Amino acid sequence: GEYMIDLEQYLEATVDYYQEEQENYCQACEECGNDDADGGRKLAAVDCDSCYAECQFYENFEEQGYVDAAEYLECGMVGEANDDGSAYYVGPICGNSGQQISLGVFTDEFCSIFNKDGTSLDELIQANADDNNGVVPQITYHNIQKVSSGSCISCLVEPEDDADANEEPEVQQVCEELYENAAKCETPYSFSGVISSGVEDYANQAANEDTVCGFIKAVNGGAYDEEGEISLSSSNVSAGGGSSTTGWQKFTIAVLAVGTLGLVGFAATLHSALTKGTKADLSSNGGALA
């Protein structure tokens, strides 16, 4: 199937997952002092020779002058409002490639209007950061980069060593959250998901699946620009179905446009003729009206 979800919801779920994973990693790193029976230096997926430096960075990055980009997963105002009531807002955006996630500067509380006065994110962060012994603050994307790294999250919870083999497998909470909140297009792909399950909680999604599929197709086809406006340069612009404009439709639009211009010209000619006729009548009557 194909799925679409709000960027803030996606980041909130996935960043929480990676932050918890990092905490577990560093907790295991702390146990590296206890070598195993063979004197090995690896504990599960933890490399005990390199994990300490990595975990020290994560634990102390604020003291080193770094600001975690994950603090701006939700659109929010940075600093104080100006005297005229205007303000700067920061929120997540998709990169030009569609593969990376970064932060953008906006001028509205919904983070939908990009700032165009040249003020950069770094300038905002530095202007509103607390004094940190003269250290210039920098944005670190270490949590968000994991989300857009291309690596996959296994939705299967790894069973414990002493778990019963007959137990039902558990699903990762992050996967459940993403699936429940996402717009779904499953039926065209012959996928028997919740859309076709008849579950009452998903009745509304099932009723609107055709619309959702059309919208996802339009977005994938570039029908909308980075600000959410319809992209007139796209070959996949439509009113609601996501299908391309046909040759016949383009021809009809062209004929209507030419016809409209012709009517405008005819109306202007007719108006000019009537105006001249009225002036001629007035002249013949000596300029006086009866």
Image: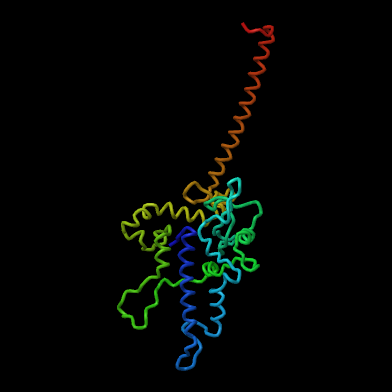
How many numbered discs, if any? 0
Measured along the vertical axis of the image, is residue 78 above or below residue 56? above
Q: Where is residue 134 in the image (x, y as percent from the top left)?
A: 65, 67
Which residue is at the front of the view, 3 or 38? 38
For the N terminus, the image quarter is bottom left
Colour pattern: rainbow
**Residue at 58 percent of width and 40 percent of height:** 254
Q: Where is residue 154 in the image (x, y as percent from the top left)?
A: 44, 72
Q: Residue furthest top?
A: 290
Which residue is at the front of the view, 207 or 8? 8
Q: Where is residue 171 in the image (x, y as percent from the top left)?
A: 38, 70
Which residue is at the front of the view, 133 or 211? 133
Measured along the vertical axis of the image, is residue 4 above or below residue 38? above
**Residue at 46 percent of width and 59 percent of height:** 5
**Residue at 49 percent of width and 78 percent of height:** 26
Location of residue 196 by image quarter: bottom left
Which residue is at the front of the view, 190 or 102? 102
Measured along the vertical axis of the image, is residue 66 above or below residue 9? below
Q: Where is residue 201 in the image (x, y as percent from the top left)?
A: 33, 57
Location of residue 190 by image quarter: bottom left
Measured along the vertical axis of the image, is residue 128 above or below residue 240? below
| Residue 273 horizontal side relative to residue 22, left or right | right
**Residue at 48 percent of width and 56 percent of height:** 216
For the C terminus, the image quarter is top right
| Residue 242 horizontal side relative to residue 139, left or right | left
